[in-house]
Image (cartoon, rainbow, N blue to C red):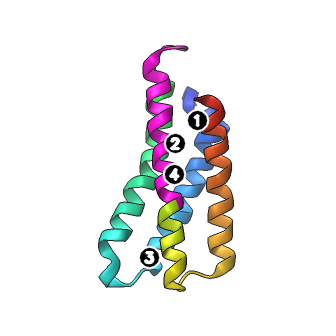
Protein backbone atom coordinates (compact mmCIF):
# COMPACT_ATOMS: atom_id res chain seq x y z
CA UNK A 1 0.00 0.00 0.00
CA UNK A 2 1.34 3.46 -0.90
CA UNK A 3 1.46 6.14 1.79
CA UNK A 4 -1.34 8.26 0.32
CA UNK A 5 -3.67 5.23 0.20
CA UNK A 6 -3.60 5.12 4.01
CA UNK A 7 -5.00 8.67 4.27
CA UNK A 8 -8.68 8.98 5.11
CA UNK A 9 -8.89 12.10 2.93
CA UNK A 10 -7.62 10.10 -0.03
CA UNK A 11 -10.10 7.27 0.55
CA UNK A 12 -13.03 9.70 0.92
CA UNK A 13 -11.94 11.64 -2.18
CA UNK A 14 -11.98 8.39 -4.18
CA UNK A 15 -15.51 7.75 -2.86
CA UNK A 16 -16.50 11.26 -3.92
CA UNK A 17 -15.01 10.72 -7.37
CA UNK A 18 -17.17 7.61 -7.78
CA UNK A 19 -20.25 9.62 -6.74
CA UNK A 20 -19.33 12.42 -9.15
CA UNK A 21 -18.97 9.95 -12.01
CA UNK A 22 -22.42 8.51 -11.27
CA UNK A 23 -23.90 12.01 -11.25
CA UNK A 24 -22.25 13.03 -14.52
CA UNK A 25 -23.81 10.00 -16.22
CA UNK A 26 -27.24 11.47 -15.43
CA UNK A 27 -26.55 14.87 -16.99
CA UNK A 28 -28.18 15.55 -20.37
CA UNK A 29 -25.99 15.47 -23.48
CA UNK A 30 -26.24 19.23 -23.79
CA UNK A 31 -24.37 19.53 -20.50
CA UNK A 32 -21.25 17.69 -21.68
CA UNK A 33 -18.93 20.62 -20.81
CA UNK A 34 -20.30 20.71 -17.25
CA UNK A 35 -19.95 16.93 -16.93
CA UNK A 36 -16.36 17.11 -18.19
CA UNK A 37 -15.51 19.93 -15.76
CA UNK A 38 -17.05 17.98 -12.88
CA UNK A 39 -15.10 14.83 -13.76
CA UNK A 40 -11.82 16.74 -14.04
CA UNK A 41 -12.31 18.66 -10.78
CA UNK A 42 -13.37 15.51 -8.88
CA UNK A 43 -10.38 13.61 -10.27
CA UNK A 44 -8.04 16.41 -9.28
CA UNK A 45 -8.77 15.93 -5.58
CA UNK A 46 -7.29 12.45 -5.02
CA UNK A 47 -4.57 13.02 -7.62
CA UNK A 48 -3.29 16.12 -5.83
CA UNK A 49 -3.59 14.48 -2.41
CA UNK A 50 -1.45 11.61 -3.72
CA UNK A 51 1.11 13.90 -5.35
CA UNK A 52 1.38 16.05 -2.23
CA UNK A 53 1.90 12.95 -0.10
CA UNK A 54 4.91 12.10 -2.23
CA UNK A 55 6.61 15.33 -1.21
CA UNK A 56 8.82 15.82 1.84
CA UNK A 57 6.91 16.29 5.11
CA UNK A 58 6.55 19.95 5.97
CA UNK A 59 7.56 21.08 2.48
CA UNK A 60 5.85 23.94 0.70
CA UNK A 61 5.11 21.58 -2.20
CA UNK A 62 3.08 19.28 0.04
CA UNK A 63 0.95 22.22 1.22
CA UNK A 64 0.61 23.49 -2.36
CA UNK A 65 -0.84 20.21 -3.63
CA UNK A 66 -3.22 19.97 -0.68
CA UNK A 67 -4.35 23.51 -1.42
CA UNK A 68 -4.96 22.61 -5.06
CA UNK A 69 -6.97 19.58 -3.95
CA UNK A 70 -9.05 21.80 -1.66
CA UNK A 71 -9.67 24.28 -4.47
CA UNK A 72 -10.85 21.47 -6.73
CA UNK A 73 -13.15 20.23 -3.97
CA UNK A 74 -14.65 23.70 -3.62
CA UNK A 75 -15.20 23.78 -7.38
CA UNK A 76 -17.00 20.45 -7.12
CA UNK A 77 -19.24 21.96 -4.45
CA UNK A 78 -20.30 24.72 -6.83
CA UNK A 79 -20.86 22.21 -9.63
CA UNK A 80 -23.02 20.11 -7.32
CA UNK A 81 -25.14 23.20 -6.63
CA UNK A 82 -25.53 23.79 -10.37
CA UNK A 83 -26.41 20.13 -10.97
CA UNK A 84 -29.06 20.36 -8.26
CA UNK A 85 -30.78 23.09 -10.28
CA UNK A 86 -31.28 20.65 -13.16
CA UNK A 87 -33.38 18.46 -10.86
CA UNK A 88 -32.27 15.24 -12.54
CA UNK A 89 -30.21 13.87 -9.66
CA UNK A 90 -32.24 12.39 -6.81
CA UNK A 91 -32.11 14.63 -3.76
CA UNK A 92 -30.78 11.82 -1.55
CA UNK A 93 -27.91 11.15 -3.97
CA UNK A 94 -27.11 14.87 -4.12
CA UNK A 95 -27.09 15.15 -0.30
CA UNK A 96 -24.85 12.09 0.03
CA UNK A 97 -22.33 13.50 -2.46
CA UNK A 98 -22.43 16.95 -0.82
CA UNK A 99 -21.91 15.49 2.67
CA UNK A 100 -18.95 13.44 1.47
CA UNK A 101 -17.47 16.50 -0.21
CA UNK A 102 -17.91 18.60 2.94
CA UNK A 103 -15.99 15.94 4.86
CA UNK A 104 -13.18 15.99 2.27
CA UNK A 105 -12.97 19.81 2.39
CA UNK A 106 -12.85 19.77 6.20
CA UNK A 107 -9.98 17.28 6.20
CA UNK A 108 -8.06 19.18 3.52
CA UNK A 109 -8.58 22.47 5.38
CA UNK A 110 -7.01 20.96 8.50
CA UNK A 111 -4.14 19.57 6.44
CA UNK A 112 -3.44 22.91 4.79
> From this viewpoint, is residue 54 visible?
no
Q: Tell me if mark 2 has few (under 14), some (14-19) or many (20+) residues whose alpha carbon lies within 10 angstroms of its own.
A: many
Which residue, given by chain and number where applicable, does mark 3 sit on?
Answer: 25
Range covered by the magenta-colored residues = 56-77
Q: Tell me if mark 3 has few (under 14), some (14-19) or many (20+) residues whose alpha carbon lies within 10 angstroms of its own.
A: few
Q: Is residue 65 located in the magenta-colored stretch of the structure?
A: yes
Residue at x 57% of width, y 29% of height: 112
Which residue, given by chain and number where applicable, does mark 4 sit on?
Answer: 74
> Is label 1 in contact with label 3 (beta carbons under 8 Å)?
no
> Does label 4 or label 3 sit earlier along the sequence?
3
Closest to the camera, between mark 2 and mark 3, is 2
Q: Tell me if mark 4 has few (under 14), some (14-19) or many (20+) residues whose alpha carbon lies within 10 angstroms of its own.
A: some
> Is label 4 in contact with label 1 (beta carbons under 8 Å)?
no
Residue at x 35% of width, y 61% of height: 37
Which residue, given by chain and number where applicable, does mark 2 sit on?
Answer: 70
Residue 12, given in percent of the width and then of the height, sits at 63, 48
Disc 3 secondary structure class: helix
Q: Could you say which quadrant of the image residue 98 lies in?
A: bottom right
Which residue, given by chain and number where applicable, does mark 1 sit on?
Answer: 5
Residue nearer the viewer, 15 or 74: 74
Residue at x 66% of width, y 32% of height: 110
> Does label 2 or label 3 sit earlier along the sequence?
3
Examine the rendered structure and indicate whether residue 90 appears above or below residue 66. Answer: below
- Compared across the picture, whether 57 is left or right of 102 comes to left
Residue 22, given in percent of the width and then of the height, sits at 51, 71
Disc 2 secondary structure class: helix
Residue nearer the viewer, 103 or 56: 103
> From this viewpoint, is residue 18 visible?
yes
For marks 4 and 3, give the CA distance. Answer: 21 Å
Examine the rendered structure and indicate whether residue 50 appears above or below residue 80. Answer: above
**Mark carried by residue 17:** none
Amino acid sequence: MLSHEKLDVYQRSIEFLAAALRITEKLPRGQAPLADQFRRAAMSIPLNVAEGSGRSPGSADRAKFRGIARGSAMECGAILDVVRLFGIVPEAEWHQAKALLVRVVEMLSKMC
